[in-house]
Image (cartoon, coloured by chain):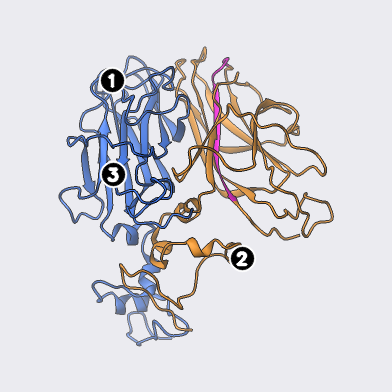
Chain colours: A blue, B orange
Amino acid sequence: MPLPGTVTNPPVLGPTPNLGPVAVVQESIIPTQPPLSLWEFLPERTSLVLQGNSYGCVMATGEITVAAQPTGGAEGSDLAIFNGESIGPGAGLNGGPGKTYIIDRVFAFINVTAAAATQLSIIGQIIPAIPLEAGPADTATILRWSLSGRRKTYLGKGALVAAAAGALITTQPTAVDSKWFIMGSSSIGTGTANVGTSVSAECYGRYLVPPGCYFAMNVITGTATGAAGGFIGFEWHEVQLQLPA
Amino acid sequence: MPLTLPAVGMSNVGATPNLAPPAIQQVGIVPTQPPLQYNQYLPERTNLVLQGNSYGCILATGLTSVALQPTTLSDLAIFNGEPIGGAGSSEPGAVGGGPGKTYIIDRVFGFLNAAAAAVTQLSLVGQIIPAQPLEAGPSDVTSILRWSLSGRRSTYTGKAALVTNVTTQPTAVANKWFILGSSAASGGAASIGTAVEANCYGRYLIPPGAYFSLTGIVGTAVASSMFVGFEWHEVQLPLPA
């Protein structure tokens, strides 16, 4: 048994890959293609984010939170993303040559004190591709960033849209009444000074947004915050996936 | 056999061992998988959702929440209406699964959409109800909202029957409910938006002929307030005897 730190030249890619820490030390000098052992040791999302097409976004200005599930014709979103990648055969329903967006984490927080102690929940909705519908214009003020820290600007084709102050998005996307699903468990703002009440929900890549499709979000509170009270954001990966028929 | 690793950006790697579970390979899902490097790097659920048979559902109208563990009442339940085989089981459909797909319950959630009279909390309870030999499934309640997690389908194309607010089909067993997730509390009597999410990690399997039932519990009951839903994957699994 070599002493810790001893270089013994194990056959990293041989019949039995050496998965021990010594192999990691040896091969970590390879700048662009770490060996299998290192890939296996990386945190869950690192290899994917390393591809350079992973982003996050958050609303630049807050929005009034809603004190009920959006229903009754104003099935509005506060923040949504449209996948503006090229649509292939199947008018988007089969994906296409463009990248699919993988929604990986969503979050929201309250930034204005409410009139009473309240709770905060996040709701989301997947809105399937609508053939031949032109996507909305991107709202450039919505803040976005590269998760790999390598890009200063967003280079993808997603169109992010946010509600106007005190309003909801009711078209592009047009969400469906009551079809919102909860994302994460609710959090409580203790007392009326509930600034900083937040929710973060891991999605585990469960929600796919192919070209032509939308992902929409909103938040629910027991006591509506004042104007600019609710901030919403999410993180996603853009990957060219071969969607089966 | 030596292990090889594709360079980043390459399409596929030939003889590289396929890391998918053998059971999945048997049913022909493998050919549609993306290149190996993405299989390895994608978030946990993406490759499964990519197959196109993953769905979510939620009640379209809220139910009166119950302030006690339910006995036979299910707020929302799903019946697996896939063909029953009996492969590997002496009790048709009960254990062995069959030629039809098994439903993998992956995430459940619930929330309150009407205010209670007092500060309250919300919990979710579930129950697996095994396949009942020769029992015909219930009729699907089409008003229960459902969606594709891959965003590719506007309608549900599976064979599940979703039912709501029922005490038969399924008939749950008193006290056999298990908690899903931890409870959430409201900040005040204005309890709208109190929500619970529980990731199940594919822990609950519903073979053809079986049910999964979901119900909410609150401290202070409110009419029309309880909304529950869940997400599931439909996969053809060779369940052992």
The numbered mark at residue A167 is: 1
The amino acid type, in three-letter code, at marker 3 is: Gly
Q: Residue at x 58, y 62 (%)?
A: B24
Q: Nearer the viewer, mark 3 or mark 2?
A: 3
Same chain assignment for discs 3 and 2: no
First along the sequence among labels 3 and 1: 3
Give the extent of the magenta segment.
B222-234
The amino acid type, in three-letter code, at marker 1 is: Ala
Height in image: A130 above or below B7?
Answer: above
Q: Quadrant of residue B172?
A: top right
Question: What chain does badge 1 belong to?
Answer: A
Per the image, the residue denoted by label 2 is B26
The image shows residue B200 at horizontal and vertical percentages of: 55, 45
Q: CA distance from mark 3 to mark 1?
A: 24 Å
> In the drawing, does residue A135 fall left or right of residue A155?
right
Q: Nearer the viewer, mark 3 or mark 1?
A: 3
Height in image: B17 above or below A92?
Answer: below
